[in-house]
Amino acid sequence: MTKQVPRGADRRDAIADAAIHLVATRGLRGLTHRAVDAEAGLPPGSTSYYLRTRDALLTACVSRMLTRDIGGMPAAGTDPLELIVTMTVGLAEHRPDDLVARYELSLEASRQPQLRAAIDEGGRQLRAMLAQALTGYSVPDPDAAAWPVAAMLDGLMYDRVAGTGATLSPEAFEAAVRRSVTALLSGLKDAR
């Protein structure tokens, strides 16, 4: 049976997915248009047809991860503590390639303004959604609180995929995330 070659928007998603996987597994040096074509099972030249430059390819990775982040948000009305714990544990468990690629791309963005702009915009969108959740938890000034909460969650996920947190069992990791998020949210609620 032959593999279905995606078309249009599906092909763009396949290209971005393959690029994310390559960044996560080979680093930025392993990311080439030719390698993306091969990883995605596309004819040679497909990636460069859709994304002419390396900058466009990197920005497509950021955009695709943001789309998955937003699409993976639990339904509105979910308890904010559960929402934050579920998202953090779920990302580390089900999308470790996205996390590793995000950290690689974040470091690269310190040298590339266009990529920095894409990462900053995605971060603003995710922090705005986090601020909404914090409002439901009665955290004062949720917009200001979203930054330190997001930074702590990033640290927990980074340690899970690239640090000694990888040695924890899934249950121990979830318990540590729950304990950390509970303590942080309680502290933020009490800090008036």
Image (spheres, rainbow, N blue to C red):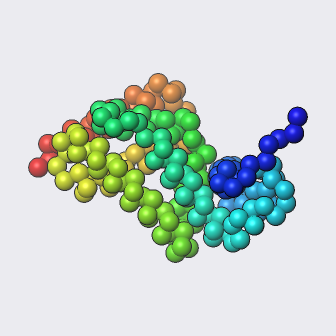
Q: Residue at 54% x, 35% y: name it.
A: 93
Residue at the farthest left position: 192
In x, y percent, where is residue 117? 48, 70
Res 164 visible: no
Q: Residue at 75% x, 62% y: name it.
A: 47
In x, y percent, where is residue 45? 82, 64
Residue at the farthest right position: 1
Specify the quadrant of the image occupied by residue 135.
top left
In x, y percent, where is residue 33? 76, 63
Q: Residue at 65% x, 54% y: name it.
A: 9
Asked whether 29 or 125 is in front, the reply is: 125
Residue at the farthest front position: 8
Q: In this view, does 170 lie to the left or right of 16?
A: left
Asked whether 117 or 101 is in front, the reply is: 117
Query: Quarter holding the N terminus?
Result: top right
In x, y percent, where is residue 80? 30, 37
Against 73, residue 28 (above or below) is below
Asked whether 43 or 165 is in front, the reply is: 43
Q: In this view, does 68 lie to the left or right of 146?
A: right
Residue at the farthest top position: 171
Asked whether 180 or 163 is in front, the reply is: 180
Q: How many marks?
A: 0
Q: Residue at 29% x, 50% y: name it.
A: 131
